[in-house]
Image: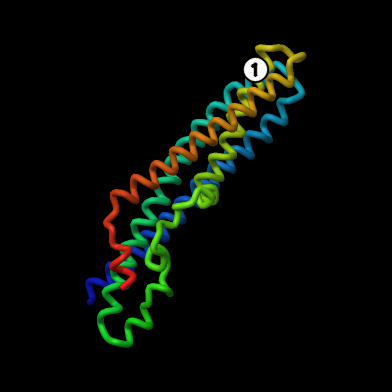
Amino acid sequence: MSALVTEHSVLQAAASATVSEAASRTSLYVFSLSSSLVAMGFVSQSPETFRLFAAAILPALFVLGLFTIVRLVDTGIENQHLLRGIARIRAYYRTLTPEAAAYFSADGGRWPEAHAVPLFSSGVAFLTTAASMIAFINSIVAGTGVTLLANNLFGGAQIRLAVGVGVAATVALMVLFLAYQRWRYRSAEAAAPREETELQR
């Protein structure tokens, strides 16, 4: 029992660490983006300088966003794995005494203990993750860069075409990210032990 309580505490601390890391990485990306936008505002009075600065900073922001997104998906999967470990221990707690079943009931526990289906089984749930939020912003950053590039190639007279190309790039990148995130979560779900039924007992 002492070992189980220790493991329970370790799993809780590790789960909290994944949330803290996700928050830190999200803040780092948003801070980098906001400071870059302020800097772009200062150089916007010179079109030539603005184009050179945007050509340097937007790809860097996009790559930083990709790194952030991949790690945010990883931390989300790690958090679910840790919660499964906590749920396994709580399932053992329920067997200690007849009264323990009420105190450690599955209905009062966190996911995945209180749910028979995965938390991210629906498409809408994938839109609410921290990774999805950063991916949406990063897709706009990429779309903006594509728009500026297209406007430079097509000339100022074709601004609508340039904007259309940028919007298409934004949507395409977001769709690709959602497909990637769904694949990662489903792969992790398939590799995880099928213990939800036992946890409900």
* Residue 182 in the image, given as x and y percentages of width and height: 43, 43
- In the image, residue 159 sits, relative to residue 133, either above or below, namely above
* Residue 117 in the image, given as x and y percentages of width and height: 40, 59
Instruction: Identify the residue position indicated by label 1 in the image.
Output: 150
- In the image, residue 14 sits, relative to residue 200, either above or below, namely above
Instruction: Please tell me which residue is depicted at 64% across the width and 39% down the height of the picture.
Output: 34
Crowding near the residue tagged with mark 1, few <14, some 14–19, many ≥20 C-alpha atoms within 10 Å: many
- In the image, residue 23 sits, relative to residue 66, either above or below, namely below
Secondary element type, mark 1:
helix
Q: Is residue 8 left or right of residue 52?
A: left
Q: Is residue 175 left or right of residue 17?
A: right
Q: Say which amino acid is labelled 1.
A: Ala
**Which color scheme is applied?**
rainbow
Q: Nearer the viewer, residue 124 or 154?
A: 124
Q: Quadrant of the N terminus?
A: bottom left
* Residue 119 in the image, given as x and y percentages of width and height: 44, 57
Instruction: Please tell me which residue is depicted at 64% across the width and 29% down the height of the picture.
Output: 167
Instruction: Please tell me which residue is depicted at 28% across the width and 62% down the height of the picture.
Output: 195
How many marks the image carries: the answer is 1
* Residue 14 in the image, given as x and y percentages of width and height: 36, 59
Q: Quadrant of the C terminus?
A: bottom left
Q: Is residue 23 left or right of residue 74?
A: right
Q: Nearer the viewer, residue 19 or 35?
A: 19
Q: Is residue 16 left or right of residue 88?
A: right
Instruction: Please tell me which residue is depicted at 49% across the width and 40% down the height of the picture.
Output: 178
